[in-house]
Image (cartoon, rainbow, N blue to C red):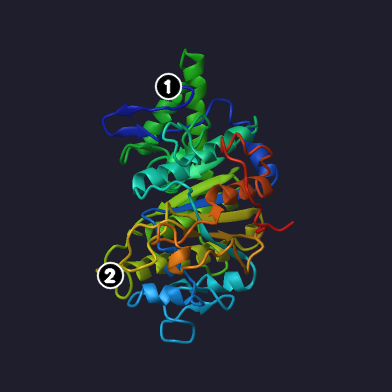
C-alpha cells in the first residue's frame, strides 16, 4: 500500500523505500524529548563457534575433543583471557575483556534454540521469527515487540537495520527501515539529485491525491531529518576507533543514530563468515572475524560513553559447532552456543546459564554442547526488563519464559 512503502523509479532515479505509516512527522519532536531505551541486535550469521569464543578452559574434555584447534589455557602463548577461573575469552576478543571486568558485559553460555535443525537457513529463520520449529510464522520477533509497544508518537527511525535489506526479525506489520549507508538515505539521481529532489517535492506538494501528498511529503521530511543528523560529518567520541570493515561501519552508524536523538529504539546489524568447517584457527578464519567483532563492540561502547546507560547490545547466532574438531581442523554444525550482552543496564562480569559439561555422556546427541537456556529466555528478559514490554506471549507465541537469568540491573 502507498501508506506503507513508496517507490519512485524513473531510469536511475530511486527514492529509498520507507516502511512507515503516515502522520509520523509530528512524532519527531516527541522523540527528542526523552532518551529512548535502545536495543542493538547483532546476528553472527553462519554459526559462530561459541566454544572458541568463550573458552571453557577449566574443562579437560574441551582439550580432548580439540587437539589442534583448542584455545590454550591462560598463561600460555595465545592463551585464553581468564574471566572467572573456568571460562576465558579468545585472545582475539581482548578488546572487550575490560568491559567484562568492569561489569558492562555479560555472557550467556550453553544457550540456543530447542529445535534440532542443523540447517543454517531454518535455524536463522527460527531465531529471527522467535518460533523455533514453526515455518509458518510470517513476522519477526522484533517486529512483534514494536507492535506490542506501538504508540502514536513513534519516530520513523524507531527501528532501523544497518543492512541492504530488512532482516527477518524486523519484518511484519510495524514500520522499520533498512539503510545500507546513512549518507545515502534519500533520493539518488547522480549529480542531479538535489534538483530532482526539489522538483519531485514540488510535485508532491501539488498532488491532488491527499493520501499520496501526505505520504510523499513525509518521505521528503524523513530525508531532511537524516540530513540534519549530517552523517557524513560524524566523528566518534572519546577516541573510539572502529575497525575498517562493514561491521565497524554499521556500529559507528548505529552510535550516530542513537546520539542524534531521532527516536531510535531498535537497531539491527549482522556479520557473516562464521561457518568454519576448515582451518578454523591460526591462520584461519575465526581469529580475523573475532578481531573485527570484538573491536567493533569495544569501539561502540567507547564512542557512546555515558549514553550506554540507555543501551543494551545482544549478540546471537543460529547454532553452535560440534565439540570435536573435524579432519580439516575445523568444526561442523552443532547445537548449544554463546550470547553476549553489553551495556549500562547489564549486570556484567559474569557468565550466566547452567554449564552442562563436555564429557561424552553430557553432550547433546553425543557430539554437541547441550542447551540449558532457550534463546527466547534471553530475549524475553531484554524486552521486559530493558524495553518495558509486559506481555511476552504476543512477542513469542506459544512460549512461556522458563527462567530469569538476572543479567539486568535492578
For numbered disc 1, what is the local secondary structure? helix
389 lies above or below 372: above
Residue 389 spot, x, y in % from top left: 66, 41
Residue 221 spot, x, y in % from top left: 52, 33
Few, some or many residues within 10 Å of mark 1 (<14, 14–19, 20+):
some
The residue lying at 49 percent from left, 24 percent from top is: 215
Count up the numbered dots. 2
194 lies above or below 337: above
Report the mark closest to the observer, 2 or 1: 2
Residue under label 1, please give it: 203
User: Is residue 21 in sight in this rendering?
Assistant: yes
The residue lying at 46 percent from left, 69 percent from top is: 359
Q: Quadrant of the N terminus?
A: top left
The residue lying at 33 percent from left, 64 percent from top is: 331
359 lies above or below 113: below
Q: Quadrant of the C terminus?
A: bottom right
For numbered disc 2, what is the local secondary structure? loop
Which label is found at residue 19?
A: none
In terms of depth relative to the viewer, which is nearer, 143 or 362?
362
150 lies above or below 57: above
> Which corner quadrant of the image does residue 328 belong to?
bottom left
Few, some or many residues within 10 Å of mark 2 (<14, 14–19, 20+):
some
Residue under label 2, please give it: 279
In terms of depth relative to the viewer, which is nearer, 275 or 22?
275
Residues under labels 2 and 1: Cα distance?
Answer: 58 Å
User: Is residue 242 in sight in this rendering?
Assistant: no
Residue 230 spot, x, y in % from top left: 50, 49
Q: On the rendered structure, is 348 left or right of 21?
A: right
In terms of depth relative to the viewer, which is nearer, 171 or 310?
171
> Which corner quadrant of the image does residue 321 belong to?
bottom left
Amino acid at each position: 500500500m502507498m501508506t506503507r512503502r513508496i517507490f519512485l523509479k524513473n531510469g536511475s532515479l530511486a527514492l529509498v523505500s520507507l516502511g512507515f505509516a503516515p502522520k509520523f512527522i509530528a512524532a519527531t519532536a516527541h522523540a527528542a524529548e526523552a532518551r529512548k531505551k535502545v536495543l542493538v541486535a547483532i546476528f553472527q550469521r553462519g554459526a559462530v563457534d561459541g566454544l572458541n569464543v568463550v573458552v571453557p578452559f577449566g574443562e579437560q574434555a574441551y582439550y580432548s575433543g580439540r587437539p589442534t584447534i583448542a584455545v590454550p589455557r591462560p598463561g600460555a602463548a595465545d592463551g585464553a583471557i581468564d574471566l572467572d577461573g573456568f571460562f576465558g575469552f579468545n585472545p582475539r576478543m581482548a578488546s572487550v575483556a575490560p568491559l567484562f571486568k568492569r561489569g558492562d558485559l555479560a555472557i550467556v553460555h550453553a544457550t540456543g534454540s530447542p529445535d534440532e535443525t542443523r540447517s543454517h537457513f531454518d535455524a536463522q529463520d527460527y531465531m529471527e521469527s522467535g518460533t523455533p520449529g514453526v515455518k509458518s510464522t510470517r513476522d519477526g520477533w522484533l517486529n512483534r515487540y514494536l507492535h506490542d509497544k506501538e504508540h502514536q508518537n513513534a519516530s520513523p527511525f524507531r527501528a532501523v537495520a544497518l543492512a541492504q535489506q530488512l532482516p527477518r526479525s524486523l519484518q511484519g506489520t510495524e514500520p522499520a527501515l533498512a539503510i545500507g549507508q546513512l549518507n545515502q538515505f534519500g533520493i539518488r539521481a547522480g549529480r542531479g539529485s538535489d534538483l530532482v529532489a526539489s522538483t519531485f517535492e514540488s510535485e508532491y506538494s501539488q498532488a491532488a491525491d491527499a493520501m499520496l501528498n501526505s505520504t510523499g511529503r513525509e518521505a521528503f521530511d524523513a530525508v531532511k531529518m537524516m540530513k540534519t543528523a549530517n552523517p557524513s560529518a560524524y566523528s566518534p567520541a572519546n577516541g573510539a576507533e572502529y575497525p575498517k570493515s562493514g561491521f565497524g561501519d554499521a556500529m559507528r552508524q548505529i552510535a550516530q543514530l542513537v546520539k542524534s536523538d531521532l527516536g531510535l529504539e531498535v537497531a539491527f546489524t549482522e556479520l557473516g563468515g562464521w561457518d568454519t568447517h576448515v582451518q578454523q584457527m591460526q591462520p584461519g578464519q575465526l581469529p580475523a572475524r573475532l578481531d573485527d567483532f570484538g573491536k567493533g563492540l569495544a569501539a561502540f561502547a567507547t564512542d557512546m560513553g555515558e549514553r550506554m546507560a540507555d543501551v543494551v547490545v545482544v549478540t546471537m547466532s543460529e547454532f553452535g559447532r560440534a565439540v570435536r574438531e573435524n579432519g580439516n581442523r575445523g568444526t561442523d554444525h552443532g547445537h548449544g552456543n554463546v550470547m553476549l550482552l553489553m551495556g549500562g543496564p547489564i549486570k556484567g562480569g559474569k557468565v550466566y546459564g547452567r554449564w552442562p559439561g563436555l564429557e561424552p555422556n553430557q553432550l547433546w546427541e553425543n557430539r554437541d554442547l547441550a542447551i540449558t537456556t532457550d534463546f527466547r529466555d534471553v530475549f524475553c528478559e531484554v524486552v521486559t526488563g530493558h524495553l518495558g514490554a509486559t506481555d511476552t506471549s504476543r512477542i513469542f507465541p506459544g512460549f512461556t519464559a522458563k527462567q530469569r537469568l538476572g543479567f539486568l540491573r535492578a
